[in-house]
Each structure stands twice: as structure tokens, then as C-alpha cells.
């Protein structure tokens, strides 16, 4: 479900009608399913501030003759996005789409009109503007108003030093810091709301991208130590199996092509996507962010690829970020979805296991990074555990796939969970992000696999700080660093707010993309169990490793129609059959060798 779209459907009957049912009657009085709290709150705020929006639109038209909503067919959606841009807690529109692009063309004059009203408007207008950002917690109960906006420096086009200098000049030195967890990541004050006007953003020299979604490429490219296997004279090929829209793809390309030896040829990332529409987005993104042919987009379904494909002759590593529930995304109202019912999680985890086993089946591949933007054990540690067990049954010659501790964990403290089939040592090789326990980023999971000889030992590392951070005259980011700047800007600190919100527009595991790539339906953020009246956030399975064996609460299962249940069962059966065929093929291949 798209929260903005659902909000516009609920808002549409209320625009232009003086008589008739009100918001609550429309939302909860009919036969249709009641809206989510996020949708209801979004519509409620938009209606409350409609007079201000109308005044802004009127002033813009009077001063510039521009009718902002003229070319927008869905007028209700236009009002929702205008509220988010001008009066929402974060003064930005999350997600994308044509309506957003139409509105953003006039962002500057819209903000100027709002500023004029704030200074010269009547008392009621000023009050609406001043109180419009009271709600800053989202439907999950997580306060995100003090989270920084993360900006990745695209080293394919610009150096860190140049990017930092430009940022300090554009938004002020006090608003810029470097994150300690990853190299080339700037943490920008949440009070900054004009990043899309920055020339480095427009040129693709820096990328607005959530911190958690940068961990996958960092794990795969960083490997286990200071030396990199891919820094060799010959070109090495990486594969991004589910690539669109391309932020992780281009991040990986930047990492494996920086600081190369003088005699080294460029490494290449082959980027796959099965959707015709998505591959066009990927191609456009790649042309902006990754010049020089270091990324090759291909319109292919990863599950239908073969290891002997000529495109993969030099393939050594795979980045796999498949479809998931997206339950870790807590700050983007444009990325809502279905409840994580047991049936849906089973369907998703079957698909994820199938995709991971396929990645591990390529005989020439030696490194695989698997990630999701989910908080659920079923999609994370459980998939990893099953994949290790099944893939290693078919390996011969002393080889085995192992979980290894990627170097990125030197500077990231949260680890995975020792679920059934995984030891504590293996869990400590896994990376998790938990927004419910202080990580100022969306929920995420990363695992790093290495094909190795059975006697290969794991290195031990000490905690450190990202390597290129201390050389620049810019402060290192600390959790809550910008929190004091949000005083008076509606932080509130209230729990259980219904409003979903986001600090920025970014690719966080690509939940929108994931829904299209998967045979399952889109995800929905976790909800509160009504019967127990216990917050999901208080008993989340995302707790630290100390309570990793504790039971995980699940949302109440919702009844499925017979048609939906039959369809879901059919898809699950298809995946299980494909998995069985894959195992049989490996067994036959092993028999042929003998």
C-alpha cells in the first residue's frame, strides 16, 4: 500500500464538499476496510492545514501566474504532497512519482509564499504554520526527527574533501559531520531541507542514501581485512542480482574502483533487474552516477540466469538484496505494505532462500553479501541458517561456504541473533540495524559469505573508526548530535503517534522495487497487537544478542480470501519445487564427478 495514494483516496470526497459525512465517518463508518493510522493522520493533518495550502497556492498564482495544481489530475494527492512539503514535520516529500516532480518544480516559490504568510498572515494562519509539525513520531512509535540526513559521497565523480568543502559552503559547517561507521558518508543536520538544490546532488556527485542501505556494498567490497582480493591487474566482475533503482549498485562500483593500484583495470558491476520499467530507471541512474562503463545494466531475471552465461565468465562476487517485508523501514510513509502474517513471511522467506541458494550455486563465485530491510528473523538469520545447511551438503573437494565477519563490523556494534542452526560465533558475523534501540537509521540485516577451504580461520578485529574520517576538519557524527536543533520544531517526544514520516528520500533496500521483483505482495509496517495491547517496539525481535533466543511476537494473522490463499499456496509450492530441482541438479552434478 502506498500511504500517499491511500490518503488521497480518503481525502478526495472531502475536498469541495460543505455537506456530507466527515473524515471519521468516511474512514470508519463504511463497509470498506478502515484506513491505517498513518493514512488517517495524514488526511487529518492535510485537512487541518488546507486553508494555509490554499493561501500559498493563491499567493503563488497571484505573484507568478503559476497554477501549481493545474497539470495534476489527482488533486487530493496534490494537497497531500503539498502538506508534506510545506507543513509536514520534515518539509519534504518521500518517494517519487510524476505528481511529486510536478510540485517540486515550484518548490522555491511555494516556500517563499509560505514564508510571507508566516510573517504577514492573520493569527489563524500563523498558528497553523507554527503548530503544523507537532507530530514527529511515526506509526511504529520511533522518534526520527533528530535523525541526520545521510549523504554518500560518490567517489566515482568527486573526492570526499571536495564534497565536504562544498557541503560546508552550501549548508554551513555546523550542519555537516562525517559518520564514524562508514567511509565517505556525511551526516547532515535534519534542519536542512534544501539538499535537492545542491549542485553535487543534481550532478550525481553525492547521493542521498540511508546509512543502513550502504552497509551491504561496504560488507562485500570491504571483505575481511585491509587488503582487497579485487585489487588485481585483471578486471573482476561483481553482480547485483536485484539492482534497480541502483543506489547499492553504484555504491559497490565506487568502492571497488577507488584507490586501485596504478596497473589495475577497472572492476565492473553487472546489474540485473527483471522489470522492464525498473531497468529503465536503473539505466538512467547508472548514467548519472557511474560513468565510464563500470556498471552494466541487464534486463534479466536473476533466478533464470545460468552460471555459464558469458556475462558471468569473470564473476567473483554477488550482492543479493531480494524482495522482503520491509518491516525495518520506520521513517518513510510512501513505503507501507501488508502485515507480516505467518503466511506472508513463509512465502517471502522461501523466495529469499531460493535466491540465496542460487547465488551460492555459481561455481566461480567466492563471495556473497545477502541483505534485507526486514527486522524479522524468518527473513534474516533463518534464511542464512537454512542456506548454509543446504548448500554445503552438495559441496565437495574440501570447500565450504562460511559466514565471515566483514570489516565493516569493526565500526558497527550491533550483531545478528543465534537462532536455530546458527552458533553465537556465526551470529557475531552478522550485521543488524535496529531503529527501536537507538540506531539512527532504518532496520536492516547484512550477512557475508565466503567460499573457503574447511581449515580456513577467521580473523579477529578490534573496534576502530572509519579510516578516512579523521583527516578532514569536520566533526565526527555522534548519535543525537543534531537533537538540540529540533527544539521548538515539534519533536514532542510523544509515543504512539500515528503519523509516519521520513527524513529524506533514499533507496533503503528498495522496498518499492522489492515488491515488484518478488512474487509476493508489498509489505506493511508492523502493527500493534490489539488484544495484548503490547507495542511491537517494546517486544521486538530486534533486541540485542543478549536476548536473541527469546520468542518473537508476531502480528495477529489476518484472514485471507480463498482465492488469495490458493494463490499464495500455489506460489509457495512453485518455489519449493524449484528449490527441490536445484538440489537434485547439484546432487546429479556431484554424482557425475564421481
Image (tube, rainbow, N blue to C red):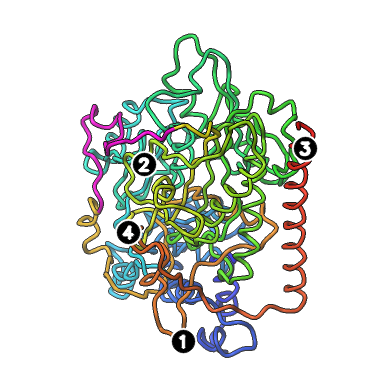
Measured in 3D between alpha carbons, the distance from the residue under mark 3 to the one under mark 1, in whole angstroms, is 54 Å
User: Is 79 left, or right, of 466 in this rendering?
Assistant: right
The CA span between labels 1 and 4 is 49 Å
Whole-percent x and y of residue 387? 59, 49
Residue under pointer 2: 409
Mark 1 or 4: the one toward you:
1
Q: Residues within 10 Å of mark 2 (few under 14, many from 20)?
A: many
Which is nearer the N-term, disc 2 or disc 3?
Answer: 2
Q: Is residue 101 visible?
A: yes
> Which of the marked residues, 2 or 1, is nearer the chain's N terminus?
2
Between the residue at mark 2 and the residue at mark 1, the CA separation in whole angstroms equals 39 Å
Does dot 4 land on a helix, a strand or a loop? helix
In this rendering, the label closer to the viewer, 2 or 3: 3
Residue 404 location, x and y as percent? 45, 39
Residue with the mark numbered 3: 591
**What stretch of residues is rendered in magenta?**
457-479
The answer to whether residue 347 is left or right of residue 82 is right
Q: Kindly report which numbered mark, 2 or 1, lies closer to the viewer in this rendering.
A: 2
* Mark 2 and mark 3: Cα distance apart in space: 39 Å
Amino acid at each position: 500500500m502506498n500511504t500517499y495514494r491511500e490518503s488521497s483516496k480518503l481525502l478526495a470526497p472531502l475536498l469541495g464538499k460543505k455537506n456530507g459525512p466527515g473524515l471519521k465517518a468516511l474512514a470508519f463508518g463504511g463497509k470498506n476496510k478502515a484506513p491505517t493510522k498513518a493514512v488517517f493522520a495524514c488526511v487529518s493533518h492535510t485537512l487541518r492545514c488546507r486553508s494555509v495550502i490554499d493561501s500559498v497556492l493563491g499567493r503563488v498564482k497571484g505573484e507568478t501566474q503559476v497554477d501549481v495544481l493545474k497539470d495534476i489530475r489527482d488533486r487530493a494527492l496534490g494537497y497531500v504532497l503539498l502538506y508534506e512539503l510545506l507543513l509536514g514535520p520534515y518539509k519534504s516529500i518521500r518517494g517519487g512519482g510524476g505528481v511529486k516532480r510536478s510540485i517540486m518544480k515550484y518548490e522555491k516559490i511555494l516556500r517563499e509564499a509560505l514564508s510571507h504568510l508566516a510573517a504577514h498572515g492573520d493569527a489563524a494562519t500563523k498558528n497553523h504554520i507554527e503548530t503544523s509539525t507537532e507530530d514527529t513520531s511515526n506509526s511504529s512509535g520511533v522518534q526520527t526527527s533528530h535523525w541526520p540526513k545521510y549523504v554518500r559521497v560518490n567517489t566515482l565523480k568527486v573526492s570526499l574533501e571536495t564534497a565536504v568543502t562544498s557541503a560546508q559552503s552550501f549548508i554551513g559547517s555546523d550542519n555537516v559531520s562525517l559518520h564514524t561507521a562508514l567511509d565517505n558518508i556525511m551526516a547532515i543536520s535534519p534542519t536542512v531541507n534544501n539538499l535537492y538544490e545542491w549542485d553535487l546532488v543534481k550532478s550525481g556527485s553525492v547521493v542521498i542514501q540511508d546509512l543502513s542501505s550502504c552497509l551491504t556494498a561496504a560488507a562485500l567490497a570491504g571483505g575481511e581485512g585491509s587488503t582487497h582480493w579485487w585489487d588485481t591487474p585483471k578486471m573482476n566482475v561483481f553482480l547485483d542480482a536485484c539492482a534497480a533503482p541502483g543506489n547499492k549498485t553504484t555504491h559497490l562500483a565506487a568502492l571497488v574502483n577507488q584507490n586501485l593500484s596504478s596497473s589495475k583495470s577497472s572492476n565492473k558491476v553487472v546489474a540485473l533487474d527483471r522489470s522492464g520499467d525498473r531497468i529503465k530507471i536503473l539505466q538512467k541512474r547508472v548514467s548519472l552516477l557511474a560513468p565510464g562503463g563500470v556498471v552494466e545494466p541487464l534486463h534479466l531475471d536473476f533466478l533464470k540466469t545460468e552460471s555459464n552465461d558469458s556475462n558471468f565468465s569473470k564473476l567473483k562476487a554477488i550482492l543479493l538484496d531480494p524482495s522482503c517485508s520491509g518491516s525495518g523501514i520506520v521513517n518513510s510513509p510512501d513505503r507501507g505494505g501488508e502485515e507480516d502474517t505467518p503466511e506472508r513471511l513463509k512465502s517471502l522467506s522461501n523466495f529469499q532462500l531460493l535466491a540465496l541458494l542460487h547465488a551460492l550455486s555459481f561455481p566461480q563465485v567466492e563471495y556473497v553479501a545477502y541483505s534485507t530491510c526486514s527486522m524479522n528473523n524468518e527473513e534474516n538469520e533463518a534464511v542464512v541458517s537454512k542456506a548454509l545447511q543446504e548448500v554445503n551438503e552438495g559441496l565437495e573437494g574440501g570447500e565450504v561456504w562460511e559466514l565471515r565477519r566483514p570489516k565493516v563490523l569493526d565500526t558497527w556494534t550491533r550483531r545478528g541473533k543465534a537462532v536455530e542452526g546458527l552458533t553465537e560465533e556465526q551470529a557475531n558475523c552478522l550485521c543488524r540495524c535496529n531503529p527501536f534501540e537507538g540506531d539512527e537509521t532504518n532496520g536492516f540485516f547484512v550477512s557475508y559469505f565466503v567460499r573457503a577451504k574447511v581449515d580456513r580461520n577467521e580473523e579477529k578485529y578490534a573496534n576502530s573508526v572509519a579510516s578516512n574520517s579523521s583527516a578532514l576538519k569536520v566533526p565526527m557524527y555522534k548519535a543525537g548530535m543534531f537533537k538540540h536543533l529540533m527544539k521548538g520544531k515539534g519533536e514532542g517526544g510523544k509515543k504512539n503517534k500515528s503519523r509516519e514520516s521520513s527524513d529524506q528520500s533514499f533507496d533503503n533496500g528498495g522496498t518499492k522495487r522489492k515488491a515488484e521483483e518478488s512474487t509476493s505482495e508489498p509489505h506493511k509496517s508492523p502493527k500493534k497487537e490489539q488484544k495484548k495491547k503490547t507495542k511491537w517496539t517494546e517486544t521486538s525481535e530486534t533486541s540485542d544478542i543478549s536476548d536473541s533466543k527469546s520468542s518473537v511476537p508476531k502480528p495477529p494473522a489476518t484472514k485471507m480470501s480463498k482465492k488469495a490463499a490458493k494463490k499464495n499456496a500455489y506460489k509457495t509450492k512453485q518455489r519449493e519445487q524449484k528449490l527441490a530441482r536445484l538440489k537434485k541438479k547439484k546432487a546429479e552434478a556431484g554424482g557425475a564427478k564421481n
